[in-house]
Amino acid sequence: MTYRELIDQLADSSGKSKAQTKELLEDAISVLSSQLARGNGVTIPDLGTFGCKVKEVQKVYSPHYKKYMLIPPKRVVEFSPSSVLKDELKFVGKEDE
């Protein structure tokens, strides 16, 4: 599903215009992004939890330079699906096709 298709479906189901729906979706993404940038987690019921994790320094071998290099630490986003979403994904059968 593309961003445009998501906006179209949300606009159809909510009865709002596509412009209003796009603005609301952009605001929601902005809030989610800012909370994750601060290191806070965001929980959305029936979907899951978005969190932020710090990856430590990694020592990797570079075949190009033929030596070990250090990759600096960085923050990454984690997603943990809710039990409701896990149950929905578990029962994929022929009736879903």
Image (cartoon, rainbow, N blue to C red):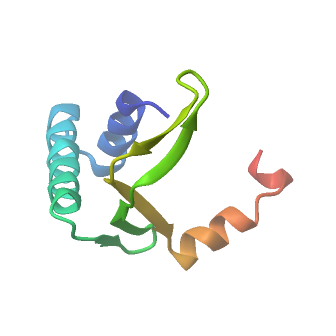
Q: Position of residue 67 (x, y in %)?
A: 54, 34
Question: Relative to 93, is 25 above or below?
Answer: above
Left or right side of 31 for 7: right
Question: Relative to 78, is 20 above or below?
Answer: above
Picture residue at 21% right of the left edge, 41% below the top: 21
Q: Position of residue 35 (x, y in %)?
A: 17, 62
In this orientation, which residue lies closer to the viewer: 91 or 51? 51
Question: Relative to 67, is 48 above or below?
Answer: below
Picture residue at 39% right of the left edge, 38% below the top: 6
Picture residue at 41% right of the left edge, 31% below the top: 5
In this orientation, which residue lies closer to the viewer: 12 or 25? 25
Residue sticking out furthest to the bottom: 83
**In which quadrant of the rendered view does residue 70 lie?**
top left
Q: Position of residue 19 (x, y in %)?
A: 16, 32
Residue sticking out furthest to the front: 67
Q: Position of residue 45 (x, y in %)?
A: 38, 75
In this orientation, which residue lies closer to the viewer: 13 or 61? 61
Total tally of numbered discs in the picture: 0
Left or right side of 69 for 93: right
Quadrant including the C terminus: top right
Picture residue at 45% right of the left edge, 67% below the top: 47
**In which quadrant of the rendered view does residue 4 lie?**
top left
Question: Relative to 25, is 42 above or below?
Answer: below
Residue sticking out furthest to the right: 94
